[in-house]
Amino acid sequence: MCIKARLAQSFSMAASTYDTYADVQPETAACLMARLNNRKYHKILEIGCGTGSYTLMLARKFVNSHILAVDISPLMVAQARIKLGRYSRVRLERADGEHLPALISGPFDLITSSSALQWFENLERTIQQYCRILSPSGSLLFALFGPETLFELNRTLRHECGDSFCLPVDSFPNGTALHGFLSGAFNKWNVRELHLCRTYPDLLSLLRRLKHTGVAPRTAKVPLVRTGARLLELERSYKKHFGAIRATYQIFICEGSRSTDPQ
């Protein structure tokens, strides 16, 4: 199964539980909303809308905007349609945000995304594509997870399991790469880094949260934990190195604008 198919499957499996278990994602979306000014965005494109929580924030803030929100998971789109059903100016479609179909051609005044673009295989090319379908004064605003996300869990797994298990965060772009991607496409750009930390009562709670939000597709061919005893071993190792079941989420807030004029 290809990477994108696995992603679609993983997030579809989490569609019904995502809103219950997502804790960092809503705060990330709120950070994006704080960056949006009171400009009038006639047409907005959202990439990786998931269950539509960020879409709903956009619809409530920009009451005269037409919003097109896409996601690779059909079940995520279905959940979003339930949430956004009363907003006739919001259209939700299944589409791969990295390879937009020709009918999504713009121009858009704002292209935005929350917690999705880290999954893309060629983000630099995708950002250039987004730049081409922005209006002359359009902006790109997105948040994604960086490679230091869940470093506590990642290091524990490497220490206890070697290379048998790896989290997908290793392939996420870092700040240097993001600066390069944006500077190659936009006249003005900005990258801000922040860290959100969460503490969980036990390792099982963290693993369940990841599973039910679809953010950690399993990359090994065998289950991570076969027995309760093995889970306790991993938890002891985690606490030995980090003192508690603490998880850090590295987040980059990225902005790009085609306009050279102050907004």
Image: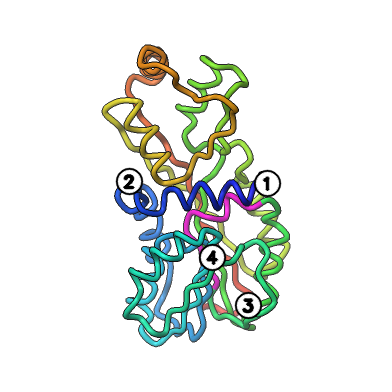
Residue 234, how many percent across, how many down?
A: 42, 17
Q: Which mark is residue 2?
A: 1
Front-lying residue, 181 or 115: 115
Which of marks 4 and 2 precedes in the sequence? Answer: 2
Residue contact between numbered discs 4 and 3, judged by CB atoms under 8 Å: no
Q: Relative to residue 47, is residue 200 depicted above or below?
A: above
Which of marks 1 and 4 precedes in the sequence? Answer: 1
Residue 245, how many percent across, how many down?
A: 34, 26
Front-lying residue, 259 or 89: 89
Q: Nearer the viewer, mark 4 or mark 1?
A: 1
Which of marks 3 and 4 precedes in the sequence? Answer: 4
Q: Residues within 10 Å of mark 4 (few under 14, many from 20)?
A: many
From which residue to which does the magenta span run?
111-120
Front-lying residue, 2 or 63: 2
Give the spatial CA distance, label 4 vs label 3: 11 Å
Give the spatial CA distance, label 3 vs label 2: 31 Å
Q: Which mark is residue 21?
A: 2
- Residue name at image x 64 percent, y 83 percent: 136
Residue that label 3 marks: 104
Q: Amino acid at mark 1?
A: Cys
